[in-house]
Amino acid sequence: MEYVLGAVAVFVVAMAVKGLKIVQQAETLIIERLGRYHRTLASGINIIWPVLERPRSIEWRYMRQGPGGKPIPVRRATTKIDLRETVYDFPRQNVITRDNVVTEINALLYFQVIDPRRAIYEIANLPDAIEKLTQTTLRNVIGEMDLDETLSSRDTINSKLRVILDQATDKWGVKVNRVELQDINPPADIRDAMEKQMRAERDRRAAILEAEGHKKSKILEAEGFREAQINEAEGAKQARILVAEGEAEARRRVAEAEAEAIKRVTGAITESGGDPGNYLIALRYIEALKEMVSGKDNKVVYLPYEATGVLSSIGGIRDMLEGVKPAAG
């Protein structure tokens, strides 16, 4: 009897231990009762009936770092479903662009299980399904784009992939948060051609910039020369104007002085009873004769016919001036 009680006690303890399930935070278990879904366990301590109930075992795929840092897929059976956001690194695959260029692409997918029940019962192997769906969707998206557009439109590709994958995996209870393309590697010959094109484009831009700089330099030089010429002409103009104004002012003052002198002489001659006209004519003739005989090479001096009359009038001028002197005194 003691052995029976002992056996029963051991069985009860074993069942209690087996029926005690501790679920960690951000994890869950799917419990089936007699092969049918019964409930989803929350985090913490849970108790199940070991004979009637058991956790549903699923096959999950994980990525591990292998030799050389290359990711290696590992499959294992587990009863726990991770509810955290999971990153999945897909292996490299070859896709063909619209212009028939074979390109090697690998991607990262960030997804999260939001409905564990559907993740188990709506799809046989969730990680494999997501991987295959991502590969086919990536081929379709890249197949609609040229190589140049593929290389320059990563954000567009990521957005398209995320929307398509999120809609497709919704029935599996999965939320696709992000899709990132890691590498886009065209063939070696295409890369060489692209590098040559890039260098040629840079050389062309450098030549254009150099030509534009030379052009601007010439324009600035011409504008500077023009400004200098304008300033020089303006300065010469102002100088000539000032010289002309100075000469005009000098002539005006000389004329005023001569007029004042003539006025005084004429007044004096008039007071003495002489003719001022003869005086002025004689004065002009005297100045003309002075210029005629002032040259070094002058050998012969011709006197005009009227000069005799002028010379005769000089005596009259002297007499008038002598007559004026006493009166002035």
Image (cartoon, grey):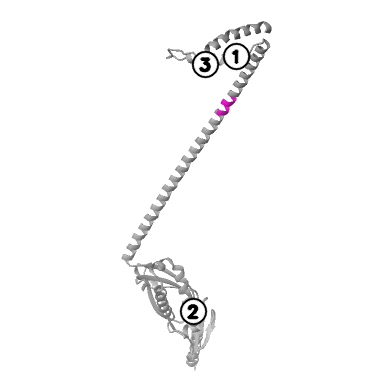
Find the distance from the CA under tag 3 to the CA under tag 1: 15 Å
Q: Is 168 placed left or right of 324 in the picture?
A: left
Residue 73 in view of the camera: yes
Please identify, in this view, whether the residue under mark 3 or under mark 2 is nearer the observer: 3
Residue at the far left: name it: 189
Residue at the far bottom: name it: 1
| Residue 148 x, y percent position in the rendering | 39, 66
Q: Circle 1: is it few (<14), some (14-19), or many (20+) Cα within 10 Å?
A: some
Which image quarter holds the C terminus?
Answer: top right
Q: Quadrant of residue 75?
A: bottom left
Q: For the residue labelled by badge 3, is the local secondary structure a helix, a strand or a loop?
A: helix
Is residue 248 part of the magenta span, yes or no?
A: yes
| Residue 311 x, y percent position in the rendering | 54, 10
Q: Is 150 placed left or right of 324 in the picture?
A: left
Which circle marks residue 167 in the picture? 2
In the rendered view, tell whether residue 176 sits above or below residue 300: below
In terms of secondary structure, what is the magenta stretch mainly? helix
Residue in the foreground of this view, choosing between 129 and 318: 318
Q: Residue at x 61, y 18 (%)?
A: 258
Magenta span of residues: 244-249
Please identify, in this view, whether the residue under mark 2 or under mark 1 is nearer the observer: 1
Q: For the residue labelled by badge 1, is the local secondary structure a helix, a strand or a loop?
A: helix
Q: Amino acid at mark 1?
A: Asn
Residue 29 in view of the camera: no
Which circle marks residue 317 in the picture? none
Q: Amino acid at mark 3?
A: Ala
